[in-house]
Amino acid sequence: AAALSWLIDARVMRLIVGQPQFAGVMLTIAIAFMLRGAVSMGFGPESRNYPTPWSDDKTVFGDIVVADLSLVIVAAALLVTLVLFWFLRKTPLGISIQAASQNQLAAYLNGIRVKRVTSLVWAIAGGIAALCGLLLAPTALVDIGLWIVVLKALAAVVLGGFGSIPGAIVGGLLLGMIEQFAGVYLPDGFKDAMAYIVLIGVLIVWPRGLLGEAHGRRV
């Protein structure tokens, strides 16, 4: 997954460098549907189940029963988050990634190899996405429609604030609680729609999110 993501950036995305951001958005959407079609042709459209050694095991904490699979997922998510946070904040390469994401021209003028850094970001994102898929697969039936989960992740990031790892965590937790409350207290259908309602509402009322940084420019 990391190698494929790196290849997409190096061989496809660089062809539209300098074009409006909308072009990049549409191109990545097109690539996503192409990959979805390729997966459907290679593995079929049928839903699949992927059990793990922890699928049927449970751990008891007093009166609370927690599936071991849930504990593994939480532990893996925390580990990846901490490693990514440390990498971006404490390593020269991570700082270069942040600089390139904020101002590519300034980063280039300071000696940062922006193209290589961008490809690395794509590779890291692809690897983490694959890990998320591995963690998600045992909890649900896997089919080509499972990509819709990405939209919920986007809503969590928008709620927490782009560019903020703590914000993404807070946004994900808040979105999960909002969905659970909606499933209990609101009519059927609202639970699945809450992610998109939150996404639209935050973009209208507070576009930079809860913990996102405001970027200004003198005029």
Image (cartoon, helix red, strand yellow):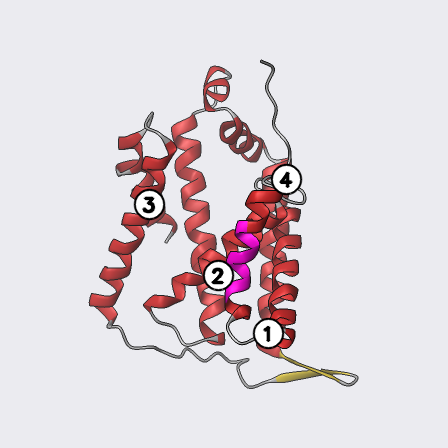
The magenta-colored residue range is: 193-200
Mark 3 crowdedness (10 Å alpha carbons): few <14, some 14-19, many ≥20:
some
Q: Is residue 112 above or below residue 214?
A: above
| Rendered location of residue 214, percent (x, y) | 64, 31
Residue tagged 3 = 28
Residue tagged 1 = 183
Distance from label 2 to label 3 (Cα)?
A: 19 Å
Distance from label 1 to label 4 (Cα)?
A: 28 Å
Q: Earlier in the sequence, mark 2 or mark 1?
A: 2
Circle 4/circle 2 CB separation < 8 Å: no
Residue tagged 2 = 132
Q: Earlier in the sequence, mark 4 or mark 2?
A: 2
Helix, strand or loop for the magenta stretch, by majority? helix
Q: Amino acid at mark 3?
A: Thr
Name the residue located 64 percent from the left edge and 64 percent from the top edge. 178
Q: In this rendering, which labeled residue sits more in front, label 4 or label 2?
A: 4
In the image, 89: left or right of 97? right
Distance from label 2 to label 1 (Cα)?
A: 24 Å
Residue tagged 4 = 212
Find the residue positioned furthest to the right: 62
* The N terminus, quarter of image: bottom left
**Secondary structure beneath label 2:** helix
